[in-house]
Amino acid sequence: MSWTALRRHTPARIALGRSGFGLPTAAHLAFQAAHARARDAVHAALDAAAIVSQIGARGFEVMCVESAAASRQAYLRMPDLGRTLSVESRARLSEPMLAPDVVIVVGDGLSSVAVERNAVPVLELLGRRLRDIGLRLAPIIVATGARVALADEIGELLQARLSVILIGERPGLSAADSLGMYLTFAPRRGRLDSERNCISNIHAAGMTAEAAAARAVELIQSMLEQRASGVLLAARACAPTVMTRARP
């Protein structure tokens, strides 16, 4: 099969042709446009008010919080600020509340565009399915200036059994609007990335909202049964069942 034929099966930049020792003008301009979209997605601010309104319109309670990053520039230059709540947000989430089974966080991450395009459809499907299987949800948390680990502190404050964060992934040259979902059992500050499960590449040309929500529900049920997430969940799921013989 020729490289040109393979182009039908992938968004990767293959078989672009050449003009002398360089790329054809059209391919070069397409690359520049993709780079611009990725850069704009990183720097764009999330319209939190619009997301809150959309979530509320679908029948979910919703709260808005901020990380310790006071600006987008601070967020990009000092990643640790995005992993902890601001003083005001921490105080708000410390107020007495019935401990939920699951807290779902919607965070801007490195692509607000991904969140604005893809988060609400996934959230709607996921939230309804979790309710259908009898799990108690916390109010949906919309977080600005968020890194993945911000859900650890949120889950710990709310005493949730499990946290889920829908967050904009680092934009690439094939997709600037890819959403990721990270799930952590027994969330608390200091959790490692190896203690999470990730569902990624959620966008129009990638994984559908329906598929992402279905996979998340499967993972959540497994996490609650095995009381683990990340590599420990994989280890327990693959462990052989030990059969014991009753004594005569």
Image (cartoon, rainbow, N blue to C red):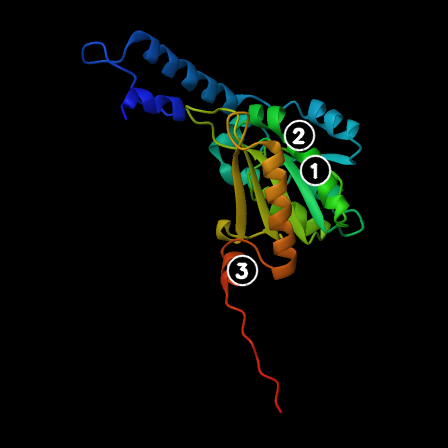
Outermost residue toward the front in this view = 1
Q: Nearer the viewer, residue 117 or 86?
A: 117
Q: Which residue is mark 1?
A: 141
Q: Is residue 173 left or right of residue 245?
A: left
Q: Which residue is mark 3?
A: 237
Residue type beneath disc 1: Ile
Q: Disc 1 to disc 2, how far (Cα)?
A: 15 Å
Q: Disc 2 to disc 3, how far (Cα)?
A: 29 Å
Task: Say which quarter of the image contains residue 59.
Answer: top right
Sequence order check: which comes first, mark 2 or mark 3?
2
**Which residue appears at 69% of the width and 26% of the height?**
51
Q: Is residue 197 visible?
A: yes
Task: Say which quarter of the image contains residue 113.
Answer: top right
Residue type beneath disc 3: Ala
Q: Split into 4 quadrants, where in the image is the N terminus?
A: top left
Outermost residue toward the bottom in this view = 248
Task: Say which quarter of the image contains residue 167.
Answer: top right
Q: Is residue 186 visible?
A: no
**Which residue appears at 34% of the width and 8% of the height?**
26
Mark 1 is surrounded, within 10 Å at the Cα level, by few (under 14), some (14 to 19) or many (20 or more) other residues, namely many
Where residue 83 appears, x then y in whole percent?
Answer: 56, 42
Mark 2 is surrounded, within 10 Å at the Cα level, by few (under 14), some (14 to 19) or many (20 or more) other residues, namely some
Q: Is residue 21 left or right of residue 102?
A: left
Question: Looking at the picture, does residue 69 appear above or below residue 160?
Answer: above
Sequence order check: which comes first, mark 1 or mark 2?
2
Sequence order check: which comes first, mark 3 or mark 1?
1
The mark lying in front, picked from 3 and 1, is: 3
